[in-house]
Amino acid sequence: MTHGVGHDVTRQGEPDMTTVFKFGGASIKDADAIRHLTPLLEEHTDRPLIVVVSAMGKTTNKLEALLAAARSEGKEDAYRECFEALQADHHEAMEALFGDSRDSPAERVDALFDELDALHRKHRASPYARHYDQTVCYGELISTTIVAAWLNHCGIATDWHDARELVRTDACHQAANLDWAATADAIRERLRGSECVALTQGFIGGTEHGDATTLGREGSDFSAAIFAHCLDAREVVIWKDVTGLFNADPRRFDNAIQLERLSYAEATELAWHGAKVIHPKTLGPLQEKSIPLTVRSFETPDATPSVIDAERRFDAEAPSCILREEQVWIEVLPRDFAFMDEPRQHDILGRLVEAGLHANLVDSSAMRFALCLDNKPERLEQLIDSLEADYEINREDGLTLLTVRHPQPGMMDTLSEGREALAERRNATTAQRLFRSSDCPETWHIPESR
Ligand SMILES: Nc1ncnc2c1ncn2[C@@H]1O[C@H](COP(=O)(O)OP(=O)(O)O)[C@@H](O)[C@H]1O
Ligand SMILES: N[C@@H](CC(=O)OP(=O)(O)O)C(=O)O
């Protein structure tokens, strides 16, 4: 597989010893969490270190709410409330970290909040996706401003870099596509040989015209892989609130076990099917350069981590379970009693692509084509409006898709007990069933292998 990097972005000399760290929202959710970064970084400042950071905690969700209020008529109060709450959260963290120290980045952060406020007015009439990117990028711009100031305050010399100028993309807002050659040039020119820790934003990029773009929700892992790929890094470490990658979300499965070693291919499958711990686009750019990915706990950094590399030996040792919630099932039926043949499927899938959606499960029969989709309201509305012009549509919301990799015989049936499966799919390595979320337990249990 190639990532469009092409022959013009080749290894230049020996790989340097760059390490890329990625800290997600949970690892910088408040002042205490940010304080924890210092010892983790101190151990690594003797070699080139790139640090990719997400927005604090659930800031991106809050910015999405801010955007919704900004785009609705008569919601000025809700907008102002969201805005002030966000600003207050960030101020609280800065006050706890810096007190009245002159190192506090409060002025710069307030300037970023002012920019965000002004951009709203400017982009209110822009298409949703463009407005989205000009808004949510501030979560990362602000968090990195605070973290960079904190590291410098602690004596770790850190340069702040604007990822909008480094991660160069097209203008496909909310799911921007990389211009790998321009990105590699920019990253190499600005970051190679840096004496300081280079700190930048995950998730965001920019077009050649200076518009902010985003790489897809939870895309900071992918950003880390982009930097590592372009710098031929020796390792990427994703710091999480779990000790590594498990065979199921340890918060939802009471007997999930950690996978200490797995291949790029298997980790990609898990991520693709919705294991939220790694963004699915992360592994490809690393695999292409044989850069190992370590998933490690920022709370217990000495705990055995998970390592993902080319070794496939351990992949199928334990079955893995993945839950995808807030699913929508859409049945598309012909109005003219004609078959749902390939031209029709092609037509429907074309509209799905146009709406920027991905089908997590597809099922077809003579007179019916059905899709299981994430509930992304703006995009679903576009898809359904388009399909309703030519087809009859049945829709069911509130569903959970369970995927099992390497299922043991009978395992899916045990996991399904007492629940109606609205749809299912199975191949040699993977089984999937779709349930009503109201029928599903809060805590699941992986059946013992027979
Ligand atoms: N297979 C899995 N292995 C480990 N964690 C998982 C898995 N699937 C889901 N998770 C969840 O992912 C969470 C960490 O990811 P996330 O919250 O996106 O981190 P961050 O915001 O720091 O990037 C964990 O708290 C865990 O509940
Ligand atoms: N802040 C963005 C990007 C991201 O990757 O975040 P996290 O690393 O916290 O999952 C989001 O919430 O989608």
Image (spheres, grey):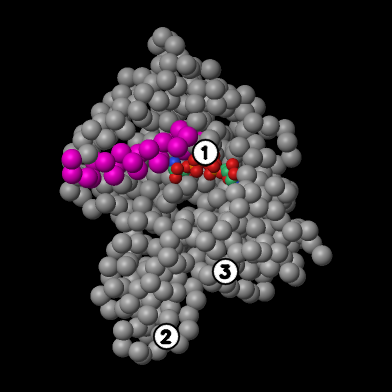
Q: Depth check: 343 or 225 in front?
A: 343
Q: Pointers 2 and 3 in contact (CB under 8 A)?
A: no
Q: Quadrant of residue 83?
A: top left
Kind of residue sitting beneath label 2: Met
Q: Quadrant of residue 374?
A: bottom left
Q: Residue at x 73, y 49 (%)?
A: 255
- Give the alpha-carbon distance from disc 1 to disc 2, as whole Å: 45 Å
Label 1 beta carbon within 8 A of ligand 1: yes
Can residue 284 be seen here?
no
Kind of residue sitting beneath label 3: Ala
Q: Pointers 1 and 3 in contact (CB under 8 A)?
A: no
Q: Earlier in the sequence, mark 2 or mark 3?
A: 2
Q: Is residue 85 above or below residue 421?
A: above
Kind of residue sitting beneath label 1: Gly
Residue 367 bears which disc, if any? 2
Q: Circle 1 sits on which residue?
A: 24
Q: Is residue 278 above or below residue 407?
A: above
Q: Nearer the viewer, mark 2 or mark 3?
A: 3
Q: Residue at x 79, y 62 (%)?
A: 449
Q: Earlier in the sequence, mark 1 or mark 3?
A: 1
Label 2 beta carbon within 8 A of ligand 1: no
Q: Nearer the viewer, mark 1 or mark 2?
A: 2
Q: Nearer the viewer, mark 1 or mark 3?
A: 3
Question: Which structural element holds mark 1?
Answer: loop
- Give the alpha-carbon distance from disc 2 to disc 3, as whole Å: 20 Å
- Residue 242 falls left or right of residue 187: right
Q: Residue at x 71, y 56 (%)?
A: 446
The magenta region covers 50-74
